[in-house]
Image (cartoon, rainbow, N blue to C red):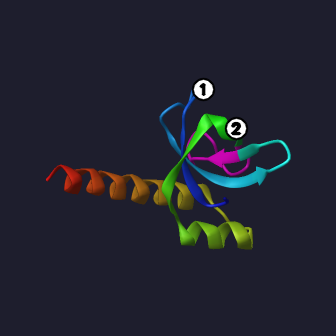
């Protein structure tokens, strides 16, 4: 689950894309960062029912998370790539 892109379905951050940086399976909670309002130092705890999993996972982020050197700028760049890929898919689906 770590490194997975998700969309927030509820709360102040509704509609925003985040990355899962940790999870607690017993509590059904994931910890999310977006590199802007939710930084690596203080991730947002969110219940699984309040997020939607997106189809993409970033390998570079997975490596950074596993090595323990994840940065806010890396998260922002990965989210920007994800959003660009999503917009390309939307355009190709319309055309």
Residue occupying image coordinates x 49% and y 38%: 16
Quadrant position of residue 71: bottom right
Tell me the crowding category of disc 1: few under 14, some 14 to 19, or many 20 or more residues within 10 angstroms, Cα based: few
Q: Which residue is identified by label 1?
A: 11
Q: CA distance from mark 2 to mark 1?
A: 10 Å
Residue occupying image coordinates x 22% and y 53%: 93
Say which label, 2 or 1, has the lower sequence index: 1
User: Residue 40 colored magenta?
Assistant: yes
User: Residue 24 colored magenta?
Assistant: no
Given the current orientation, which residue lies at the most extreme right position?
Answer: 26
Left/right of residue 21 with respect to residue 55 in the rendered view: right
Task: Residue 38 in the image: state x and y as whole percent.
Answer: 63, 42
Residue occupying image coordinates x 59% and y 66%: 61
User: Magenta stretch mostly in which secondary structure?
Assistant: loop
Q: Which residue is identified by label 2?
A: 46
Q: Are marks 2 and 1 in contact (CB under 8 Å)?
A: yes
Tell me the crowding category of disc 2: few under 14, some 14 to 19, or many 20 or more residues within 10 angstroms, Cα based: some
Left/right of residue 87 with respect to residue 25 in the rendered view: left
Instruction: Note whether 44 is above or below 70 in the view shown.
Output: above
Q: Which mark is residue 34?
A: none
Left/right of residue 39 with respect to residue 13 in the rendered view: right
Pick the residue in front: 15 or 81: 15
Pick the residue in front: 72 or 6: 6
Instruction: Note whether 30 is above or below 3 in the view shown.
Output: above
Task: Residue 32 in the image: state x and y as whole percent.
Answer: 65, 46
Looking at the rendering, the stretch of residues picked out in magenta corresponds to 31-43
Number of marks in picture = 2
Left/right of residue 45 with respect to residue 3 in the rendered view: right
Task: Residue 58 in the image: state x and y as whole percent.
Answer: 53, 66
Secondary structure beneath label 2: strand
């Amino acid at each position: 689950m770590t490194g997975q892109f998700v969309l927030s379905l509820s709360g102040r951050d509704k509609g925003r894309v985040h990355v899962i940086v940790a999870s607690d399976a017993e509590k059904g909670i994931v910890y999310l960062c977006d590199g802007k309002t939710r930084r690596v130092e203080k991730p947002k705890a969110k219940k699984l029912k309040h997020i939607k999993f997106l189809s993409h996972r970033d390998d570079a982020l997975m490596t950074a998370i596993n090595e323990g050197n994840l940065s806010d700028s890396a998260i922002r760049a990965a989210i920007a790539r994800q959003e660009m890929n999503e917009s390309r898919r939307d355009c190709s689906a319309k055309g």
